[in-house]
Amino acid sequence: MLKLKKGAFAALSIALIMAQVLTGCASSNSEGSANPGGSDSPSTEASSPTEISMQTLIWGTPPDVASSPFYKELQERTNVELSIDFVTSPSFTEKINLALASRKLADITVVKNFTDANIVNAINQGAFLDLTPYLSDMSKYPNLAMIPENIWADSKINGKIYGIPNATGLISESLLIRKDWLEELNLKTPETMDELTEVMKAFKANKPDIAAPMATYGTYPMAIGMYAHGTLNPEVEGQGLQLIKQLTPYFRDYLEYARNLYQEKLIPAEYSVLKAGQEVEMFQQGKAGVLQRPIHNAWKIEKELKKTDPQGEVMVLPPLKGTADYAQFARDSFFGAFMIPASVDKDKVEKILEYLEQSASKEINELRQFGIEGIHHKVENGEKVVTDADALAKDVGGSVYVIVNAYNKYFEIDQQSDIPSEFKDDLKKKTDMYYEQSKLDPGVGLISDTYAKRSADVFKDLETNITKVIVGQSTIEDWDAYVDQLLNNSTVQTMMQEFEEQYKIKQSAQ
């Protein structure tokens, strides 16, 4: 089994956890150095500030940059004057489309997803600068060089670098289980998918007040189970490379598994119409005993569970062995990227990259995390302690992409200061276990122009047919006929050919 430390399940559009921007440090007057990027970073003291416009993504209330001590410090340390257009997440797609259509792009334009059709089209039309030549010598950018190599590979389009990836920590979807229920019913911790099914049957038999043993929602119930059935394998006997996962025999095996879960009433009868978050509420209210969530969410979920059941305990299961592979979803990757329009003057490009390089330093990331000493934090026993979290969030803007994340694979765990040490250690251990079993998702970063333009029409019945099979309104033979129809569709064949070409380009670039 090829184990690669990367991957996301882009083709199935599984919602991943939106990574928050890493955060920062204290006042430059009392902490840090005048050169926050380290000894190899360019000095900014001798030159006047570079004016940089930025259109970026934010979750929360946009800050007042002019009055914010954080932005004042950030600009002083990096020797820039930032003009920032903060765009909230719900409005982001519309706003970026308007900017692309008008070609009025900010010097630094943040995008959510490189593989979105609008971004791919803009790249192909020359709207964004190919940064590959600028970043060929990473010794000039020691902080950016700390971003893992596989993240750079995941973020390339047509084998080229068009943006600085905003590295996340190691995010891993996992299966959470009620540890206290296992102990109460004298059940051993499951190690395989079949053992988990038996545990869920025991929950159903012994917990009559629950809604279902497993809380799940959406088109793909227990989505992590797809991996256990081999859907990360790009090779299909008789078909060669097959990069549309739903059309593989591995996905068929997952459908039969999900169908069995439904027939055994181990998942909610209304799973397909539940909204994201409702399955978490079900688990936290004691109405289910198994839940799929990112590992780093476990402590927050246990805290909420204890409001309903003070004795409730949550445990992250190890990656479970399935019929073909492990039920795992670990990615060491990125969310969003900092792009530079091709219209930016070439001399300014170097200055912009210099800012992004410095922003990726540990010192600037700590500035974002802790803010200014005496305003946002104090130092106790040599450690920074946030004293006014509300002021820090207000001055920074909450989760906002204005600096490049300095990579820390446990970031999403470490940022939760109230996790008990034993619980935290277990989360890190489980993170490593999932990562060890993780495999490359062959669909990450692949572009098909035909898929972007035609998929909504060609696959318009896909999710409906998936649900019908799972709930028993259609047979598995009906599914086979539907897949055969798609595989013989000339448009789908073109999509597959384009994906295969992209896959080979990506493999050759690594």
Image (tube, rainbow, N blue to C red):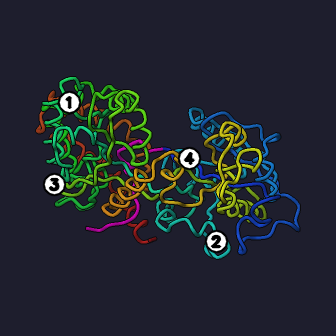
Residue at image mark 1 = 468
Question: Which residue is rendered at x = 46% and y = 71% of the image?
Answer: 509
Tag 2 and tag 1, C-beta contact below 8 Å = no
Element at label 2: loop
Label 1 and label 3: CA atoms lie apart by: 23 Å
Tag 4 and tag 3, C-beta contact below 8 Å = no
What residue range appears in magenta?
A: 1-17
Residue at image mark 2 = 142
Q: Amino acid at mark 4?
A: Gln
Is residue 469 visible in the rendered structure shown here? no
Tag 3 and tag 2, C-beta contact below 8 Å = no
Label 2 and label 4: CA atoms lie apart by: 22 Å
Q: Looking at the image, is mark 1 or mark 3 nearer the viewer?
A: 3
Q: Earlier in the sequence, mark 2 or mark 1?
A: 2
Q: Amino acid at mark 1?
A: Lys
Residue at image mark 4 = 20
Of all residues, the one furthest to the front in this rendering is 381
Q: Looking at the image, is mark 4 or mark 3 nearer the viewer?
A: 4
Q: Earlier in the sequence, mark 2 or mark 4?
A: 4
Q: Amino acid at mark 3?
A: Thr
Q: Which mark is residue 323?
A: 3
Please say whether residue 14 is one of the residues in the magenta stretch.
yes
Q: Position of residue 414 (x, y in %)?
A: 51, 53
Q: Is residue 85 left or right of residue 230?
A: right
Label 2 and label 1: CA atoms lie apart by: 52 Å
Please say whether residue 92 is one of the residues in the magenta stretch.
no
Element at label 4: loop
Within 10 Å of the Cα at label 2, are there few (<14), some (14-19), or many (20+) other Cα atoms?
some
Q: Earlier in the sequence, mark 1 or mark 3?
A: 3
Q: Earlier in the sequence, mark 4 or mark 3?
A: 4
